């Protein structure tokens, strides 16, 4: 059986679609056929124990920051893992805009290891996503990105700082790696 990372790589290279977002979505569809856990996060390598431990670390960070309170409105990827949490909404989008989501609606938006794939689709798509995040966050709302790209933290820190300044975010954490079970770099932005 191919590993989840091999499945992702071969799907990206063999896809005939010209739209990078479509290619990435199709690659994740292929990975999900091999492993539910791998389709949630490639870094889990299809291992449920690694995904659980990594997820626990991310949730612990958000709790420590006071971001997971019942009165908070949260946008998070991985619908299956959040299906029993009443204040979490998950909507599949086109990868470029957040459609009909209302302006100033959410207290927290979380992107766990998704921006590297958005960056794969192009920097302009990543910037459009961050602009949309700003639109739907309430003033004082937080945007947590766990990994911005796989280019290296120095480049990511530079780019995230520049983009954050352009779109009216304070940078609370910029590329810190605090986790034990995966190499997720934390980019914690707060909307002015």
Image (cartoon, rainbow, N blue to C red):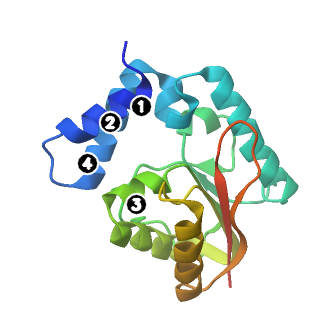
Q: Residue at x 58, y 21 (%)?
A: 47
Q: Pinpoint residue 14: horizontal percent, then vertical percent.
A: 18, 36
Q: Which residue is mark 2?
A: 9
Which tag, 1 or 4, sits closer to the chain's start? 1
> Which residue is the site of mark 1?
5
Q: Secondary structure at mark 1?
A: helix
The circle on residue 119 is 3
Establish if 138 lies above or below 107: below
- What residue does disc 4 label? 22
Instruction: Check whether the beta carbons of the residues at disc 1 and disc 4 lie within 8 A of each other.
Output: no
The crowding category of the residue bearing disc 2, from other C-alpha atoms within 10 Å (few below 14, some 14 to 19, many at least 20), is: some
Disc 1 and disc 2 in contact, CB within 8 angstroms: yes
- Res 73 quadrant in image: bottom right
User: First in sequence: mark 2 or mark 4?
Assistant: 2
Instruction: Please tell me whether mark 4 sits on a helix, a strand or a loop.
Output: helix
Q: Which numbered disc flags the more N-terminal residue, 1 or 3? A: 1
Mark 2 to mark 4 CA distance (whole Å): 14 Å
**C-alpha gap between disc 1 and disc 3:** 17 Å
Quadrant in the picture for the N terminus: top left
Q: Quadrant of residue 111?
A: bottom right
User: In front of the other: label 2 or label 4?
Assistant: 2
- Residue drawn at x 35%, y 34% is 8
**How far from the left and from the top, in percent, is residue 10?**
27, 32
Q: Residue at x 44, y 68 (%)?
A: 129
């Amino acid at each position: 059986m191919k590993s989840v990372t091999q499945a992702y790589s071969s799907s990206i290279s063999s896809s005939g679609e010209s739209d990078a977002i479509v290619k990435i979505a199709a690659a994740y569809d292929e990975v999900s056929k091999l492993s539910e856990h791998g389709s949630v996060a490639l870094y889990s390598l299809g291992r449920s124990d690694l995904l659980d431990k990594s997820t626990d670390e991310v949730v612990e960070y958000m709790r420590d920051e006071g971001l997971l309170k019942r009165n908070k409105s949260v946008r998070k990827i991985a619908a299956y893992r959040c299906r029993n949490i009443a204040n979490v909404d998950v909507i599949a989008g086109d990868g470029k805009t957040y459609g009909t989501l209302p302006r100033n609606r959410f207290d927290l938006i979380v992107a766990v290891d998704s921006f590297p794939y958005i960056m794969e689709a192009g920097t302009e798509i990543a910037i459009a996503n961050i602009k949309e995040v700003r639109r739907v966050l309430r003033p004082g709302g937080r945007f947590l990105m766990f990994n911005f790209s796989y280019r290296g933290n120095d480049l990511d820190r530079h780019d995230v700082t520049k983009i954050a300044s352009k779109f009216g975010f304070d940078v609370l954490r910029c590329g810190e790696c605090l986790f034990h079970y995966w190499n997720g770099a934390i980019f914690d932005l707060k909307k002015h």
